[in-house]
Amino acid sequence: MSKVVISLKLVEIDPNLKFEIANTELGGKAFWCIQCGMCTSGCPVAEFLKPHRIVKMVMLGLKDQLINCKEIWLCTTCFTCSERCPQEVDPANIIFSLKNIAAKQGIIPEGLRSIGKNLAETGRVIKISTYRERERKKLGLPKTPQVHVEKNREILEETSFIKALERVRQ
Amino acid sequence: MRYAYYLGCWIPARLDQYDLSTRVVAKKLGIELVDLEGAGCCGTVLVRSVNFKTNIVMSTRILALAKNMGLDLLTLCNGCYESLMEAEYLVKTNKDLREQVNTILKSTDNLVYEGGVKIKHLIEVLYNDIGLDRLRDEIKRPLDGLRVAVHYGCHILRPSNRLKFDNAENPRILDDLVEITGAKSIYWPLKLWCCGSPILAVDENLSLSIAGMKLKSAKEAGADCIVTICPSCQIQFDTFQPDISKVTGEQYNMPVLLYPQLLGLALGFTPKEVGLHLNEISAERLVKALK
């Protein structure tokens, strides 16, 4: 994160954030962090996103700042930070949790929103054109396996994925 | 050796050569691939970024479909591999989540899944089930002198506590599989780095510049080509190489081959049979150098 927080207003702090994240299935134990910076030293986007700072902000309970920042969406999900963390903090999954909290409030980057729309319409993250099917045939490949689009869509509905996509950021 | 063959999204949408070369190599080695019908996207890290549970239910559904076929699952995609492994682990170890997932699957699909399908990446099947000795015997056209920059891709290695695929900091499996063809796996500094693909939809310039750094690293190390095993990485390095050049201002002219394409050549198949003509960056100069 490029902005360094120099003043904190206690009312803006959510002291439960670290527990909220630790208790999800994704897990991630911010309170074990010793701020050694091993995570950030291996991060391919460390110029913009510093995992040890994200974890510190979780410890401080700066929920609004975290879920409104662009940087959490720059995580490439390479898991190098979680792999190397000597404290088993699991920064990658903490960042996933933060993105999930943001998405519930309708904060989703446009690019991911359109991938979500593809999923709802076709059951795949990318549409397969009829041109591709003709090409496959020319190569002697069998037809692309069919997707149960409706059943996939039901899963997206049941897990509130569609609701998050349709919610527009306030 | 019979597997439920799960293609995922990117291969049918963009990478026929991965499907083609895999089928050619599998047939030669006696691996039977049965298309997994009805399976959509596994969810992968893209869906997990928005909603973790959606990802796990989507992946579990695919495992349930494979279970109904009575087969273990073979995937060509690192993203699918990691996602399915995560789902398998959680369904097995987290009772609450298993019940939630199954409640949804029962209502949408009348499916139940309690775990048990083995998830294998193509190169795991080649390495463990076929084995290096057998592969060595099958090599008809050794790729001697070819210098390969091996790129594993993140989601086959990490998180290693879930995937248990290979040593995440110093993997050997793909290196060994490349060297069995007679090619040499070279050292290159950014070998284990991410290709940048997962953030393509969020920040295209950043995503492509990460890939650019990797291409530069491979080129400076003297690689003749990069070899990948993940459709996202392949698309990033090969299909988008002209776009990467636009962002970084550098020319790479670096052919990128999928592992079964490389193996296929060594097994004696023609470049066309392994779909080399479908790759964006021409591999002609490599092919010419081969006997």
Image (cartoon, helix red, strand yellow):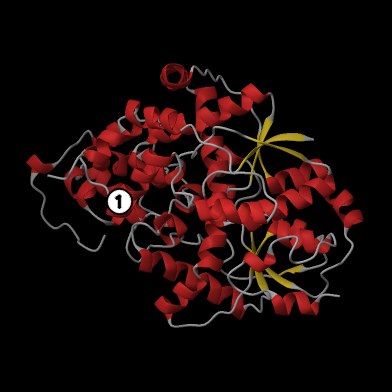
A72, A91: nearer the viewer = A72
User: Residue drawn at (16%, 45%), measured in percent from left and top?
Assistant: A169
Instruction: Relative to B65, say whether B30 is above or below.
Output: below
B291, A57: nearer the viewer = B291
- The reply, left or right, for residue B237 in relation to residue B126 is left
Quadrant where the C terminus of chain A sits is top left
B60, B169: nearer the viewer = B60
The spot of residue B258 in percent (x, y) is: 66, 60
Classed neighbour count for the residue bearing mark 1: other residues with Cα under 10 Å, few (<14), some (14–19), many (≥20): many
The spot of residue A82 in percent (x, y) is: 46, 47
The spot of residue B261 in percent (x, y) is: 72, 60
User: Residue drawn at (35%, 37%), measured in percent from left and top?
Assistant: B51
Residue B172 visible in the current orientation? no
User: Residue drawn at (39%, 62%), measured in percent from left and top?
Assistant: A45
Q: Quadrant of residue A16?
A: top left
SS for callout 1: helix
- The reply, left or right, for residue B9 in relation to residue A114 is right
Q: Disc 1 designates what residue? A: A54
User: Residue drawn at (82%, 60%), measured in percent from left and top?
Assistant: B180
The spot of residue A141 in percent (x, y) is: 67, 49
Q: Chain of mark 1?
A: A
Instruction: Relative to B85, say whether A80 is above or below.
Output: below
Mark 1 belongs to which amino acid? Ile
Residue A131 visible in the current orientation? yes
Total marks placed? 1
Quadrant where the N terminus of chain A sits is bottom left
